[in-house]
Amino acid sequence: MAPDSRSADDAYLNSVGAAFAQLRRRTHLLKHLDPPVERKDLSRNLIINIVDEADGEVTVGGVAEQLGIDPSAASRMVSDLITHGYLERLASQRDGRRTILRLTPQGVALRNRFRSQHRQAFEYITRDWPEHERLEFARLLLKYAEATSALDSGPDPRQ
């Protein structure tokens, strides 16, 4: 590989972190989404997905671990979702001393609303892209997300 193309590749790869940060900051600014994005939607969406995608029972502590935040912060975020009727606390079927979280029907509707908003945002942002690029980007983004799911079960690459 020629030196010029390597430095261009490095520049792209070095810009990925900033691009992720920009996506997180900017997507909520899309005003055309129906219904519009609410202020708390980012944190609500994160927690709804953690509970929805859990292979087993998920607790507030599990939410905190998944988000990499303090358990008290996770507890406040979960309490907001419970207060608004999106989550419910239940006794664990494996250990009655544990309290687990489950989506309510309103929580499932909120999850579906978030997914609709994400698709609307994706389609709006990529509206001028050729169709094959939109589909390829979607495929690669899903592949990337699936690879992050494997991080918990695989060996630590730093070792």
Image (cartoon, helix red, strand yellow):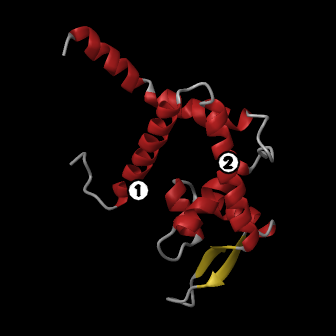
Considering only order in the chain, which callout, 1 or 2, is on the residue closer to the N terminus?
Answer: 2
Residue 3 image label: none
**Residue 43 makes an appearance in the image:** no
Measure the alpha-carbon separation of dots 2 and 1.
Answer: 20 Å
Give percent across and percent down for residue 109: 73, 64
Q: Residue at x 76, y 62 (%)?
A: 80
Q: Nearer the viewer, residue 9 or 158?
A: 9
Q: Residue at x 49, y 41 (%)?
A: 138
Q: Residue at x 20, y 48 (%)?
A: 159
Extreme residue in the top direction:
4
Give percent across and percent down for residue 125: 63, 31
Q: Residue at x 53, y 32 (%)?
A: 131
Give percent across and percent down for residue 116: 68, 50
Q: How many badges with numbers are in the image?
A: 2
Residue 7 located left or right of residue 41: left
Q: Nearer the viewer, residue 92 or 102?
A: 102
Residue 65 located left or right of residue 46: left
Residue linked to disc 1: 149
Quadrant in which the N terminus is drawn:
top left
Residue 42 image label: 2
Residue type highlighted by circle 2 = Leu
Q: Quadrant of residue 27?
A: top right
Residue type highlighted by circle 1 = Ser
| In the depicted structure, whether residue 155 falls above or below residue 124 | below
